[in-house]
Image: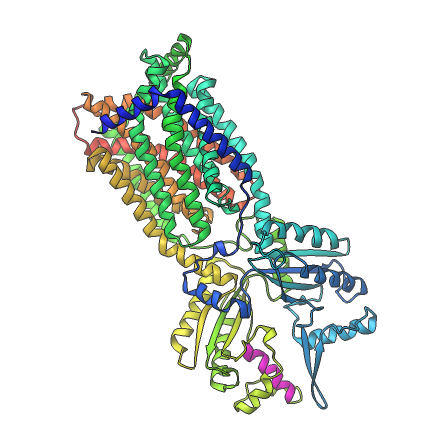
Amino acid sequence: MMDKVVAAIEGGIFAHRKLVLLVFGLITLVMCYQVTQIKIDAGFEKQLPLKHPYMQTFLEYREQFGGANRLLIAARVKEGDIFTPEFFKVFEEVSDAVFFLPGVNKSTVQSLYTPNVRFVEVVEGGFAGGNVIPAEFQPTPEWLVRVRENILKAGIVGRLVANDFTAAMVTAQLVEIDPKTGKKLDYLQVARELETNLRDKFQDDAVDIHIIGFAKAIGDIAKGAAGVVMFFGVAFLVTWALVYVFTRSQRLTLLALTCSVIAVIWDLGILRLLGFGIDPMSILVPFLVFAIGVSHGVQMVNGMSSEIQRGSDAPEAARRAFRRLVVPGGVALITDTIGFLTILLIEIRMIQELALTASLGVLVIILTNLILLPILLSFLNLKEGYRERMIRAAEGREKLWTVMARVTQRKPALIIILIAAVLLAFGMYKAPKMQIGDLHAGVPELRADSRYNMDTAMIVDKFSIGVDILTTIAETIPNGCIEYDVMSEIDRFQWRVANVPGVQSTISMPQIVKRVNTGWNEGNLQWRVLPRKSITMVQSVTPIETSTGLLNGDCSAMPVMIFTQDHKAGTINRVIAAIEEFAEKNDSERHRFRLATGNVGVMAATNQVVEATQVPILLYVYAAVVSLCLITFRSVRVTLCIIIPLSIVSVLCYALMVMLGIGLKVNTLPVAALGVGVGVDYGIYIFSRVVTSMREGANLQEAYLETLRTTGAAVLVTGLTLAIGVSTWVFSALKFQVDMGLLLAFMFLANMLGALLLLPSIAYFIIPTKKN
């Protein structure tokens, strides 16, 4: 039945070759235009697992207490302290400039110069207070002394002023919709203006400007991603050189690579037609599509070359190659597509867009590399000299294939399986140690010595806060802030969390109330406690306004802000565990503690989503592979030969991540699906040829030797080519591209070796065959 379908498709497309080429050409022109219109599409909310309970809390209280999309801009003097006229002049201009950045929620801007940063002090008649920097401020020595006193009274040392008084900070929240334009915020434009309107404008020999936050990070990542184009070019040239060495023909090499590039163009063009851009974190997907395309393209070119060696002319050789490879190639690509579609299980829009981009790209390869490529090959006029070159090349490789075919003999097969078993045991020992989330401080997508991570290190060193904040919302009865039992419980909670390793500092309503109560009692530290009577509590709560972000309008929700030293997986896990343990033991009808807002809350939710979906994703991927292998080969034994090497490589990939210090997160999770996809391509192509030869009467060793001469040679070249191409990524400015390069190089090589050595070794023991 399948042979009749293939024959009908073959007859249809090859009988109308020119028409098919015309259609492909017109579509490619349209897609090229669409690619010129595609834009980098970064967004904060795209990274949120919106259905996670933490994110429900985040969305519910975002308007009242701010979200997790913060900007921190610190101005630091290189010598002395900040209390000089020159510094305050510069800092006032920095503070004003932040107000006019795109997407800034002006009500959330805080600095020494904003009216929402106030101090309170005890005077003879009660309390007095005002702005830390009054409206009539002049940068005179007398005023600077007064401002220094106001800073100490306001308790903002460590938050808006460095602990050693060498820097001051401006903080702000960004919104997704730019209030000026009414359109989605362009984060790359924000990042550019942070550089041009702040750093470039105000940084000089006396003052350094340090900027951190999501918008700045995404701008730096996008800037580094521009280098991906260069590395794509390098990988293209490496691929060209190695494929040419294999095919011995510039035209065959050109067609194989051109069809793979067309697949990338179609992928991006379709993405643009669907209304999507490309996220900086998905910038590597086009290369992955190209890599998979090259894998299938080399198989098709190799198939045609093999037919030409047997005496066929180009049109007939192309048809024979199509006839032999369209089914295993199609099955492999459908398996790849299903593998990428399983990533849709992660309900994070950025990851779902990545899955869509990869899935579309793989589906397109069915058209470009399994249909367009053989049609183009059929038009070639390959002379007799080409056949003779390929025959000589095949004869030169015969010794290698003869040696490799020995893996289908008992002793070599047993050695290969024992080595694989040892590697599997090592992988199973290491893999469970893999952590979910980031394992390094700063932004792990960038190198440790990047400007952004250096800015982060400075701010964390000089201040008691940073960009890493986890906010727990204490939900209480209305006016809970004047009830002693409620406030006492929040105070106990803050104390518990503040003592968790990795927590840098905390801020809460009870903390401020105790300070105010001290003021009402002549500053006596013995009174830095929560008043037990509601009427006294009212007196201490009244000076605290909702603009501080410490309470909502009816005092039924009070955030506890937890500043962490970093957002490493271990830090997040410890803090979250402590919060959940406290909440489980102490939540009541009068109060409960809800996680979580802040960027660390987002990361905690994301890590939990990744942890919950990683196993189902792999199970679905393998279920798809098993199902399609069973449908294609109708043999459990053949399916096992293909699945076992894939499984071992998956385990070893996780072990390698542990050894390289790479955490499993939204950026690295797709590698597992990709590794299975590329590996199953190799396995299906190899076993398809082995089965065909065995049906023609060959024993396993003879069938595998013939497979190595054709399909196996293409697998070897493809694995080496792609591994060398991605290995150049170690020179990238993006740390996550370096990590991906190392992982992908391993996956390409390991899957290649698994398909060429382990697969036939397993087959020797479980596939019935005539004696060798």
Quarter of the N terminus within the rendering: top left
- Coloring scheme used: rainbow
Residue at the spot 44% in from the left edge and 49% down from the top edge: 351
Q: Position of residue 499 (x, y in %)?
A: 50, 71
Q: Position of residue 629 (x, y in %)?
A: 25, 37
Whether residue 115 is visible, yes or no, is: yes
Report the side of 508 relative to 653 (left or right): right
In the image, residue 693 above or below residue 505: above
Whether residue 716 is visible, yes or no, is: no
* Magenta segment: 509-520
**Occupied quadrant, residue 132:** bottom right
Residue at the spot 77% in from the left edge and 62% down from the top edge: 87
Q: Position of residue 346 (x, y in %)?
A: 39, 53
Tag count = 0
Q: Position of residue 125 (x, y in %)?
A: 71, 91
- Name the foreground residue: 654 vs 324: 324
Report the side of 97 relative to 647 (left or right): right
In the image, residue 442 above or below residue 390: below
Residue at the spot 68% in from the left edge and 75% down from the top edge: 118
In the image, residue 595 above or below residue 666: below
> Magenta residues: mostly which secondary structure?
helix
Report the side of 649 relative to 633 (left or right): right
In the image, residue 582 above or below residue 520: above
- Name the foreground residue: 30 vs 55: 30
**Occupied quadrant, residue 176:** bottom right
- Name the foreground residue: 761 vs 335: 335
Is 382 inside the magenta-drawn segment? Answer: no
Q: Residue furthest top?
A: 384
Quarter of the C terminus within the rendering: top left
